Structures are given as structure tokens and as C-alpha cells.
Amino acid sequence: MSSSVTEEAVETGITEGGNPSAFRDVLAKNHHARRKPPQHFVDMTKEERAAAMKELGLPAFRASQLSHHYFAHMTTNPEDFTDIPAAKRDELANRFFPTLITPLLVQTADAGTTVKTLWELFDGSRIESVLMRYPNRTTLCISSQVGCGMGCPFCATGKLGLTRNMSTGEILEQVRAAAVAMRDGQVAGGPGRLSNIVFMGMGEPMANYKSVLSAVRQISALPPAGFGISARNITVSTVGVVPGIKKLTMEGIPLRLAVSLHAPTNQLRDELVPMNRRFNVDQVLDAAHDYYLASKRRVSIEYALMRGINDQAEHAHELAKRLNHYGDDWVHVNPIPLNPIEGSRWTASKKEDEQAFIEILHRAGIAATMRDTRGDEIDGACGQLAAKSLVTNPSQPLATVTNR
Ligand code: SF4
């Protein structure tokens, strides 16, 4: 398949010859008609930044100064641009740093060390990010699309469908906001540093490949070209968009790849993850294993445990068999207790089934750790905060909710 994968297929995830009715299109049909977010400094190439400076009658080196303000000082406030002529500061801030995300609702849990933010975008769309502080690292889970077109029936974001792709600026602003909150001691535990990024919020990152990759490059580049968070500490997850995995393999960036498998057989996965009808379990695992071989980074296999559906001993044995087929220690399985969406028939596994599932994997020599369910009490399921807010209160005011 790889030889015939076109650029367009990678962008859309839709490959020639596939069955278009097998899953909802990765991108909504009218996504091109949607207004684009205002162009932000980080959406521009070096040349574009220089050309924009010229239009404003300024030399190109002013772009380097802005880069320093944005990535090193993490500020877009013109009052901080003290190395730039005072008469030009507001104009530069307006041109290069439009407001792309505005907090609508902030929820905290785990004694303030988990912070979930619902953001409003320029067109009223809503996305979310979750910051999780641990003793030795702080991880931010970010969104890359508004909604998701993959249609997994157990998922709140899947129920929203896909509105549009997010721009690099919209993705990076989530990172900057969290990095500033950590630096300035706004998260329980005092000042610290944002160290890890996971693309596991709303959306399928591989379906917004260009913007996601540009964001990854700018998150990992050293200041003043980027935020300086090591690529090794960035995880990109996918539900199994094989052309995207292949393209990522070619990039040679030492990211961690996470694959949301959720089922070990095609029969079951067809039901849980509609994308499987386009790229089946073998194709997805082959591509993921190739990624491991090229990157030498163990691949994470995400597996949401659903009671009586995919959490039985037979599923664990089948999963172990499929993964061990490659014969090397190439994966780390993260079973995740499903955080069920309200009114859904998909519910969380029993504790004893979760335990048995992990033990079977361990006995088969597979590294596996039950995933932390931080933020459970604040609607921690993927996309759930945005989904609930959209359904119940479309004009939610800015508010802070503390659960503990
Ligand atoms: S589980 Fe992931 S891929 Fe599936 S609909 Fe939800 S966000 Fe999309």
C-alpha cells in the first residue's frame, strides 16, 4: 500500500479504492469552506515572516525578536516587546499574535495537579486540553482537530463528528498556555516546567498531518525556534491511519507513537473502530512495528477496556499473540479503564477483569501498565468535556470548577 499512497491520502486518510462508506470521512466534506483561523506567527515559514515584516516596513530581524518573545519568554503581550520600537509593538502583536484560543471553563482535580481547560476558538468551536502534574514530569494532553471524524461508538468526541482541522497556531497555543501556567506557579505544586506533550485530546492527529508535524517541530526545537520540549517526550497517537504512520516513520523524529487498538481481532475492531475497515489490525501493527524498527522507540498500544466487549481472557491472549508475532520487545500496552459517556451502552470493565487482562499480557512477556485515569471526576474521557458543554450549555461562561 505504501508505494501508492498519495500526499492527498496522507492528508485525508482516504486512500484510493477504499470503501467510502466504511467510516465517516476523516475530514468533513465542507471543511474547505470553513473559515480558517487567523494566521499566527507559528503558522508562517521563515520567508513568510520576513515578507510580512517587509509589508509593515520592518527589517527581517524583527521576526527573530518575536520568535524569542514567543518561544523563550512565552509572551505575546506587546508591552513585553521592549527591544522593538514602541510605535510598532501593538501593530506587530495584532499582525502576528491574534488570540486563537480563549478559556471557557477550567476544571481542576487531584488536589489541583490535574487541570482540564475547555477552549473556545475564533469561530466558536470548542476543544480541550488536560494538564497532569506528576512528581517527576508534567504532561499536557492536547487537541489537534475540532471533534473527530473517526466515529468510534464509545467515544464522546466521536459523537461530535468532525468540524475542522486545527491550525498549528491553535495547537501550539495550548502548549504555550500550559507552559506559562507551569512556569508561573499557577498549577498546584509551585513553579515547574512542562515536560511532556501527548496528542491524545480531541481529533485524529494523522488526519491533520501537516499542522501537527509543524507543531511537533516547533514544540521540540530549542528556543528561540521552539519551546525546547524534547521530541522524545512527545507522543503522537493514531487510531490506525496507516499512511500517516508510514509518513511519520520517514520523518526520522524520535517521537513516541501510540496506536489506539482497542481490539485484537478485525471482527471486533471493525465494530469498535470503524477505521479498521480501511486499515485492518495487521496493516496497523505492521506499520507500527516498522515505526519501532526505524525509531527504536517502543510503540504504545492503547486499549480501552469495555465490560464484556473486549476485556475477556480470550482478548488478552489474542492481543499477546498478535504483538508477540513480531518477536521483539517492541510495544508497551496501556489498557485504559473506559470512562463511559452518559447514556452509553459501553461501560468500564470490572476491576478483576482489568487485573486478569494485565496478568495475561505479563505472562506472555508483554510490557503492560494500567493507564492512569487522571481527571476521572472531571469528565476525563476523551472529548467528554467539550461534548457535554456543547450539548448542555452552548454559551458557557468563563468559570472555574474545583472538584477537590
Ligand atoms: S476514540 Fe479517538 S479516533 Fe475514535 S472517535 Fe474518539 S477521538 Fe476519534
Image (spheres, rainbow, N blue to C red):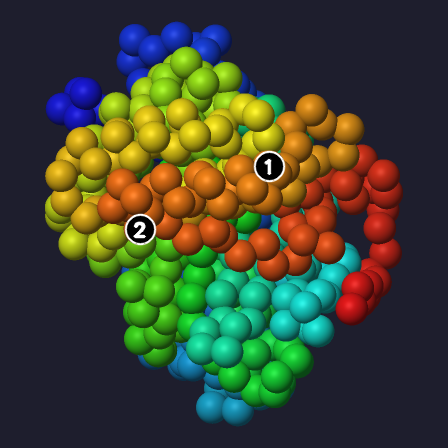
The disc at residue 367 is 2
Question: What residue appears at the point 34 percent right and 11 percent down from the top-left corner?
Answer: 18
Numbered disc 2: secondary structure: strand
One can see residue 115 in this view: yes
- Choose the circle earlier in sequence order: 1 or 2: 1
Up/down of 206 relative to 194, above or below: above
Q: Nearer the viewer, residue 309 or 147?
A: 309
- Residue pictured at 78% horizontal, 44% vertical: 389
**Up-down relation of residue 140 to residue 308 (above or below):** below
Residue 275 vs residue 121, the one in the foreground? 275
Horizontal and vertical percent position of residue 290: 16, 39
Residue at mark 2: C-beta within 8 A of ligand 1:
no
The image quadrant of residue 248 is top left
Where does residue 352 sit, x and y in percent of width and height?
56, 42
**Rendered view: 323 above or below 60:** above
Q: Give coordinates of residue 211: x percent, y percent.
A: 41, 47
Q: Disc 1 versus disc 2: distance between alpha carbons?
A: 20 Å
Residue 349: mark: 1
